[in-house]
Amino acid sequence: MIVVTGATGNIGRPLTQALAAAGRQVTAVSRHTAAVPNGVRHVVADLAEPAGLKPALAGAKALFLLLSGDLHAAGARSADIIAQAAAGGVRRVVLLSTLGVVTRPFGPTRIAMRALEDTLRESGLEWTILRPGGFASNALWWAESVRAQQVVAAPFGDVGVPIIDPADIAEVAAACLLEDRHAGRVYELTGPEVITPRRQAEALAGALGSPVRFHELTRDEARTAMSQSMPAELADDTLDILGSPSPAELRVSPDVQRVLGRAPRPFADWAARNVAAFR
């Protein structure tokens, strides 16, 4: 049995599907009731209360651990989830961390995530740590404006980073859950190229078959918009990266190729698969 937390999100959903397609028994965990593939057990649980995971972990041998932003903030009890997994007989944990723990290690959320990585390493369990950079799916922030006005509004229009398709993260996670060779490894996950917001708008236009205009926001305008859906501190961190990425944040990692034997998907592929959200 493999337990997938965050199972209804843009990583957990394709991961659950991939594991089920591989013939594995899967328990999908989410905060709310949701549809899951046939044959997959669904458990509603809040990771803020690790004891509530006990029913989900019964009989499990592997765990994919994805924490929402509030659960890797300072003061959260995320380490208790590792202890609960070990006590329940889980042998292997794949943790979704973030590239920021090495590129910008001093923010409170990244300090907490690095502490969780250390807890996992010291747990006695088999572990793999995945550290993705920015997600292609963050482009969904623009879906409403593209649908209504054919406009992508974003800051730093000509500054790019190598964003990754969440489907690639899911495939890497599946491999790490299923294959022994990934135990004890840390993988940095990026897309195949640095791509700017302006070029993302062009890719969306190509997928839609209609023009999409790019409008550059000021940092303050972007911060105000982002703070409606995430903590202000996280918005500032994100804008720091988007506006002035470090050399480490610009590096295209070979790790997707190493794990999957193929290059990561470009943003245009993500846009083509998700074009319905922008129509």
Image (cartoon, rainbow, N blue to C red):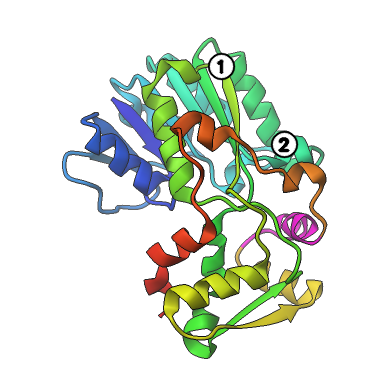
Q: Which residues are magenta?
A: 230-243
Question: Is residue 143 at least partly visible in the picture?
Answer: no
Q: Which residue is mark 1?
A: 184
Q: Are marks 1 and 2 in contact (CB under 8 Å)?
A: no
Quadrant of the rendering where the C terminus is positioned? bottom left
Quadrant of the rendering where the N terminus is positioned? top left
| Residue 241 inside the magenta-drawn segment | yes
Q: Nearer the viewer, mark 1 or mark 2?
A: 1
Type of secondary structure dominating the magenta stretch = helix
Mark 2 falls on what kind of element?
Answer: helix
x and y percentages locating residue 274 in the rendered image:
41, 65
Q: Nearer the viewer, residue 41 or 212?
A: 212
Q: Residue lying at the far bottom in this picture: please name it.
A: 149
x and y percentages locating residue 245 in the rendered image:
79, 52
x and y percentages locating residue 192 in the rendered image:
58, 48
Mark 1 falls on what kind of element?
Answer: loop
1 or 2: tag closer to the N-terminus: 2
Q: Which residue is mark 2?
A: 101
**Given the image, on which type of amino acid does mark 2 rest?**
Val
